[in-house]
Amino acid sequence: MNKYKLTKETINIYGITLYRIQALKDFNNVKAGDLGGYIEKEFNLSQDNNCWISENAKIWGNAKIFGNAEICGDVEIWGNAKIFGNAKIFENAKIYGNAKIWGDAEIFGNAEIWGNAEIFGNAKIYGDAKICEDVEIFGNAEIWGNAKICGDVEIWGNAKIFENAKIYGNAKICEDVEIFGNAKIFGNAEIFGNAKICRDVEIFGNAKICGDVEIWGNAKISENAKIFGNAKIFGNAEISENAKIFENAKISGNAKICGDVEIWGNAKI
């Protein structure tokens, strides 16, 4: 027995007719007779398992909701997007393109996800965050605020990206990293551990940051530079080429560190 039917109540969106759905039987938290959201065709919402669309949510095109996914609020999903597993999409989120949301991921607020992006695990995307292209976000990662993530970026662990931070290129962010303010991370940069990156910092090239590092101000870390341990970089400092900063070293002001330099211990520059 089908779990829902298309009613005669319709709306038009971008010239496409969508039909409100109605439950035909009890399942999960849905009762027979409950009205749901809007879909273009039965393909958009599986008749199997507990997946459901409610309130004013709208699904059309080749988008498909299946598994135990829950969609509600004013959500819009279209294109070839796939939402499945125990994923929850609510409030004003928009999912389109070839995006895939699965596992226990939650997308809400005004978040937009498109391209070939995949969000899974326990990841949460909300606020006005924008995720696109081939990005993968998983684990317990959280992205919010006006953060923008695009390219071949991978973010996982307990990483948190927020405010106006931008991550793109082939960057990899993981573990307990926090990136916020107007920070920009791009190229092949890798950041992990408990690192905190904020304000107008730029990290790019093949730079690697790990440990309890803190970087803020207008600092720039580039090329093959490596920062780790409890190092702190701030002000207008620039670290580039093959420079290595580690242990409890502090680099500040307008310092420029480049070449094959190594700075460690309790050094202050």
Image: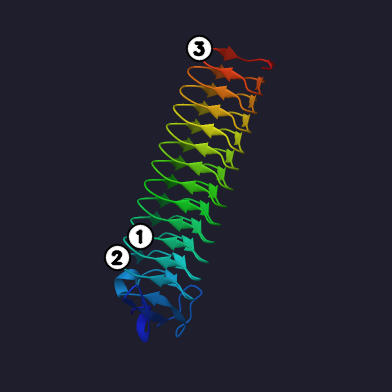
Q: Position of residue 56 (x, y in %)?
A: 47, 75
SS at circle 1: loop
Residue highlighted by disc 2: 62
State the separation of the CA atoms marked 3 and 2. 53 Å
Earlier along the polypeptide chain: callout 2 or callout 1? 2
**Disc 2 residue type (three-letter):** Asn
Q: Quadrant of the C terminus?
A: top right
- Asked if one can make out residue 138 in the rendered structure from this viewpoint, the answer is no
Q: Quadrant of the N terminus?
A: bottom left
Furthest toward the bottom, the residue is 8
Residue type marked 3: Asp
**Which residue corresponds to mark 1?**
81
The answer to the question of whether label 3 and label 2 lie on touching residues, with beta carbons closer than 8 A, is no
Residue in view at x 54 percent, y 12 percent:
261
Q: Position of residue 224 (x, y in %)?
A: 46, 22
10 Å neighbourhood of mark 2: few (<14), some, or many (≥20)?
A: some
Q: Is residue 136 left or right of residue 255?
A: left
User: Where does residue 210 sit, x and y in percent of width and height?
Assistant: 56, 28
Along the polypeptide, which appears first: circle 3 or circle 1?
A: 1
* Colouring: rainbow
The image position of residue 160, as x and y in percent, is 57, 44
Residue annotated with mark 3: 260
Mark 3 or 2 closer to N-term? 2
Which is in the foreground here, disc 3 or disc 1? 3
Under mark 1, the amino acid is Ala
Please report the residue visible at 41 percent of the width from the left and 36 percent of the height from the top.
170
Discs 3/2, front: 3
Q: Is residue 176 above or below residue 66?
A: above
Label 3: which secondary element? loop
Other-residue count near label 3 (Cα within 10 Å), few / some / many at <14 / 14–19 / ≥20: few
